[in-house]
Structure formats: structure tokens, C-alpha cells
């Protein structure tokens, strides 16, 4: 690498020509000779590293002068036959060798694969069917191979005739995958100066597992494989995508633990792993064929613990409907750019750290349907940009609504139902004038409904049933039914309370002349009212 000198004098036997694959070991260096060149290797961490290439020497050659350096540094398993990786042994062997060295992961070798292995199929297509006729030194060989591998791994028939961008309605016509055109023109592929920077294949009926070689697309910035039928695990090699900014795997069937290497994606801005719990064992291919796939309980792991602070550029995290567990680390406060954190329907079990209130740019915070304990952080009012806050379905959340919550004057949606909150609803709720949805049901709230709630002129949906809120609905709140708190759909529950009369006393726990649905306070039986 700019300074290697092989300073040994070697006498080659015979006429100076070696059979391909012969090796001579000198001072720990390996020299492999062929009919057109000699490649010098050194062993590093159980792999041969090609460091120089020279022309075939005469019977005696002094290597005291620095030989010509290889243009491409080559790494191969030390147990492999070195001669297979010489660039001068012909197109097929050289191309195959380069891919084994630079692209294949986990010490894989084409010679060890069966014919139906997607990696072998991709190689055969590159060698025999690809009209571009790439050579071992083609600059785009690696990325074209990885894209071809992706196609063979994920039911490429779905991509074979995908040429129109149906997602955006763009009139741009793409080339078909596995066609003779430049891979940068293939559907859903975007390049910058000939290098792949985006693969966007949402809702393309893709079925299969992610190949680890996708980590070799080192310039990739956008990867969107959402709304497909991916199963299996996220490869550890994803940590090699150091330029990745946007990752969307939502609505698939991925499972297994999130790899530690995931936290090396330090350029990541948006992360969407939502809805990977998939209990349907069948997927339908693009041609209508039914494929049986494993069911998935979602992706697992402790993704929101200390290592999350490495991903400081994150603006959007959506983990909905998976099997993530553990805690939310106080180090979450390091994500200063975070605007959206959604972790609904997982198995997190911890208190909610007060440090979460330092995420001053957050607009959406959804922590519902987990096992969070403790109370709402006292300083929740610091989140002045918060527009949507949901904590419903954490039955061990207790305590009162902190006064600072009423400082969230940008709030439009507040979901606190099905917890164990107590105390009364403050008259300060009238400060939340942008509020559209308020769900307080199935808690231990007491007192009455404040008349100040009538100041929330945009309120569209209100639920206070199965609480101990008593009294009657204030006129100021009922007046909202003449505005937004109303629906033409008689089956829609837009204002729900414990206003069903008791069968014995014929008295309702909460008197309401404007509710759309009433429940019995004792039996929790509810009915939709037909109000004209």
C-alpha cells in the first residue's frame, strides 16, 4: 500500500513458469505464479491479502525493487486456493474471485453453494445472461451483483416487469430488473454518479429473506422495502451501511434480535420497523401464487437502551407492533433532533425517564400498549412542540396528570385511557385549545368534567367512560356537538360517558344529554344512542 517492498531473491525451478495455483512461501509471504503474472500475498487475520502483482520472473529474479502494486487490494480465505483470485486468469475466474473477496459475506465461496442458492443464481446471471458482459475490473460489478442477488432472494418476478413508479404517480419509466440496461435505471433504484444511493421497493410483493451482502452497498442512503413479505432476521452486515439515512421495513414479517451492529448506522435519520408482527403464514406473490412463510411475533431486542445515543441524527423512530423490550434509557435525551417516537404494542417494561422531556423538537410521542410503570414525567410540559401524546394501555401507570401537561398548547391528541391514573381533570384543560381527541376512559379519575373543556372548540372525540367522573356534562361541552364534537354517522361514538341509567335506581352515574354512547358505571355495558 504505497510502501511494500519484497526484498528476497528467489530462484524459480524449471523454465520459470508455474502451474496455476502453485505457492512459494518466503518469510511468511506467499507468491502464486501463473502464465501471465505473479501475485504476492501476505497472511492477515487468517486471510490472504494480495499486496503486489508482477510479470513472470526469469529463472532468477531479484525482488529488491518494489513490484507494481495491485490496483485493488484482495482479501480471500487463507484456506482457499489463491490462484482462483488472480485477475489475470480470465474473465470468469477473476470476476468470481473478486465477488468472493469483496462482496460475499461470512466466508462464503461460490464453489460451496448449491445451484439454487440465490448467490449462485446471481453469479450465473452476471456471467451468462447479463448483456453488459462485465469483467472483473468493471467498476459497477459489486453493486450490480448485490442488486441481482436481492432480486433472486426476494422473488424477482415481482420486479421483472415493474417499470412505472406507481407509488408517486411519476411518469418516469424505469427499466426492468435483470435487464441488460444500467442497474441505475432499474425500477426503484437511484444512483448518484453511477453509484447506488437508494433502493425503494415498497409494496412490490417481494417475498424472502434479506441477504447479508446488501451491506456491501456502502453508499446506500435510502432503503425502503416496506409493505412486502420479508421474513427472517436483519443481517448483522447492515451495520456496514454507514451512509444510510432512511430505513423503512414496516409491514413485513421480520423477526429475531436487532443486531448490535445496527447502532453503527450513525447517519440514520428515519427508522421505521413497525408492524413486523405477522401471524399470517401465507404471502401472495405478484403472480397470485401463495407462499408459506414463518409467522412472526416481530423484531426483538433492547433497542431503546444506552446504545441508541449513537444514532444522534434520528428524527423519526417507529417500532409499532413488534416484540421490543427493556427500558427507555435516560440517554434518549441525546437524540436532540427527534420529532417522532412511536413504540406502541411492544413489551417495554420500565418507568418513563424524565430525560425524555428534553426532546424539545418532538411532535409525536406514542408509548401505548406496553408495560410501562410509574407516572407521567413531571416535566412533560417542556415538550412545547408536542402535538400527539398517547400512553393508553399501560395498566400500571399511576398518579395524577401533572400540571405541566396543560402547558402543551400545541397538543391535538391526548390518549390516556386504560391506565390507573387518578385525581381530577384540571380546569387548565381549557388551555389546550387545539385539542381534537381526548380519551380518559378506564382510569380512576374523579371529580367533574370542567366547563373549561368547552374552550377546546376543535374537539371531535371525547371519552370519559369507566371512570369516577360524575356530575353532568357542562353546557359548554354539549355546545361543542353543534361544532366538531358531532358525527352524521349514528354508529360513531364521538362522546362516550357513564350516562346509562341504572336498572334499579333509574339514575345515571353521569348525566349527559349530548353523549353519543352511554355506559353503565357498574357493569360497563355500553350502548350507542340514536340521537336525532
Image (cartoon, grey):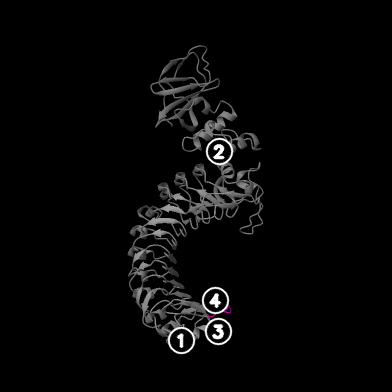
Secondary structure type for disc 2: helix
Foreground disc of the pair 2, 3: 3
Q: Which badge, 4 or 3, comes first in the chain's sequence?
A: 4
The CA span between labels 4 and 3 is: 11 Å
Foreground disc of the pair 1, 4: 4
Residue 459 visible within the image: no
Q: Which stretch appears magenta?
A: 486-491
Foreground disc of the pair 1, 3: 3
Depth order, front residue of 84/254: 254
The answer to whether residue 490 is magenta is yes
Q: Which residue is mark 2?
A: 119
Q: Which residue is mark 4?
A: 492
506 is higher (above) or lower (below) than 145: below
Depth order, front residue of 282/520: 520
Q: Which badge, 2 or 1, comes first in the chain's sequence?
A: 2
Q: Is residue 343 left or right of residue 94?
A: left
The CA span between labels 1 and 4 is: 21 Å
Residue at x 44%, y 46% (from the top left corner): 239
The answer to whether residue 266 is magenta is no
Q: Which residue is mark 1?
A: 476
- Which dot marks residue 531? 3
Secondary structure type for disc 1: helix
Secondary structure type for disc 3: loop
Amino acid at each position: 500500500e504505497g510502501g511494500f517492498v519484497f526484498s528476497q531473491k528467489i530462484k524459480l525451478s524449471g523454465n520459470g513458469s508455474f502451474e496455476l495455483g502453485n505457492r512459494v512461501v518466503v518469510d511468511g509471504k506467499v507468491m502464486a505464479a501463473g502464465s501471465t503474472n505473479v501475485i504476492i500475498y501476505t497472511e492477515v487475520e487468517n486471510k490472504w491479502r494480495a499486496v503486489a502483482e508482477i510479470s513472470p520472473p526469469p529463472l532468477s529474479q531479484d525482488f529488491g525493487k518494489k513490484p507494481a502494486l495491485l490496483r485493488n487490494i484482495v482479501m480471500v480465505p487463507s484456506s482457499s486456493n489463491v490462484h482462483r483470485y488472480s485477475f489475470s486468469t480470465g474473465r470468469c475466474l477473476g470476476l468470481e474471485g473478486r465477488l468472493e473477496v469483496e462482496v460475499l459475506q461470512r466466508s462464503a465461496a461460490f464453489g460451496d453453494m448449491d445451484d439454487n442458492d440465490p448467490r449462485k443464481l446471481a453469479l450465473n446471471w452476471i456471467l451468462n445472461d447479463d448483456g453488459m458482459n462485465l469483467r472483473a475490473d468493471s467498476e459497477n460489478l459489486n453493486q450490480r451483483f448485490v442488486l441481482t442477488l436481492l432480486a433472486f432472494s426476494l422473488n424477482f418476478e415481482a420486479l421483472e416487469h415493474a417499470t412505472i413508479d406507481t407509488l408517486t404517480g411519476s411518469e418516469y419509466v424505469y427499466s426492468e430488473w435483470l435487464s441488460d440496461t444500467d442497474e441505475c435505471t432499474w425500477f426503484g433504484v437511484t444512483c448518484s454518479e453511477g453509484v447506488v444511493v437508494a433502493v425503494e421497493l415498497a409494496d412490490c410483493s417481494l417475498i424472502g429473506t434479506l441477504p447479508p451482502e446488501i451491506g456491501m452497498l456502502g453508499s446506500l442512503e435510502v432503503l425502503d422495502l416496506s409493505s412486502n413479505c420479508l421474513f427472517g432476521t436483519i443481517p448483522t452486515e447492515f451495520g456496514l451501511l454507514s451512509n444510510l439515512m432512511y430505513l423503512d421495513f414496516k409491514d413485513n414479517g421480520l423477526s429475531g434480535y436487532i443486531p448490535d451492529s445496527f447502532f453503527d448506522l450513525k447517519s440514520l435519520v428515519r427508522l421505521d420497523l413497525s408492524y413486523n408482527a405477522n401471524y399470517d403464514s401465507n404471502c401472495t406473490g405478484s403472480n397470485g401464487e401463495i407462499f408459506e412463510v414463518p409467522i412472526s411475533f416481530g423484531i426483538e431486542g433492547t433497542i431503546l437502551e444506552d446504545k441508541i445515543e449513537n444514532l444522534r441524527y434520528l428524527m423519526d423512530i417507529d417500532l409499532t407492533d413488534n416484540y421490543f423490550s427493556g427500558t427507555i434509557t435516560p440517554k434518549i435525551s441525546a437524540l436532540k433532533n427527534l420529532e417522532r417516537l412511536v413504540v406502541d404494542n411492544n413489551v417495554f417494561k420500565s418507568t418513563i425517564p424524565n430525560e425524555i422531556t428534553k426532546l424539545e423538537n418532538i411532535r409525536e410521542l406514542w408509548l401505548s400498549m406496553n408495560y410501562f410503570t410509574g407516572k407521567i414525567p413531571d416535566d412533560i410540559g417542556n415538550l412545547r412542540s408536542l402535538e400527539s401524546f398517547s400512553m393508553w394501555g399501560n395498566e400500571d401507570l399511576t398518579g395524577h396528570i401533572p400540571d405541566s401537561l396543560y402547558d402543551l398548547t400545541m397538543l391535538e391528541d391526548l390518549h390516556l385511557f386504560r391506565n390507573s391514573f387518578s385525581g381530577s381533570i384540571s380546569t387548565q384543560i381549557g388551555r389546550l385549545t387545539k385539542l381534537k381527541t381526548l380519551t380518559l376512559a378506564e382510569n380512576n379519575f374523579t371529580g367533574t368534567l370542567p366547563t373549561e373543556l368547552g374552550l377546546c372548540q376543535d374537539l371531535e372525540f371525547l371519552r370519559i367512560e369507566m371512570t369516577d367522573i360524575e356530575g353532568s356534562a357542562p353546557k359548554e361541552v354539549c355546545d361543542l356537538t353543534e361544532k366538531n364534537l358531532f358525527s352524521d354517522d349514528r354508529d360513531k361514538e364521538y362522546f362516550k360517558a357513564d350516562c346509562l341509567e341504572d336498572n334499579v335506581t333509574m339514575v345515571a352515574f353521569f348525566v349527559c344529554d349530548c353523549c353519543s354512547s352511554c355506559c353503565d358505571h357498574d357493569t360497563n355495558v355500553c350502548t350507542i344512542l340514536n340521537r336525532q
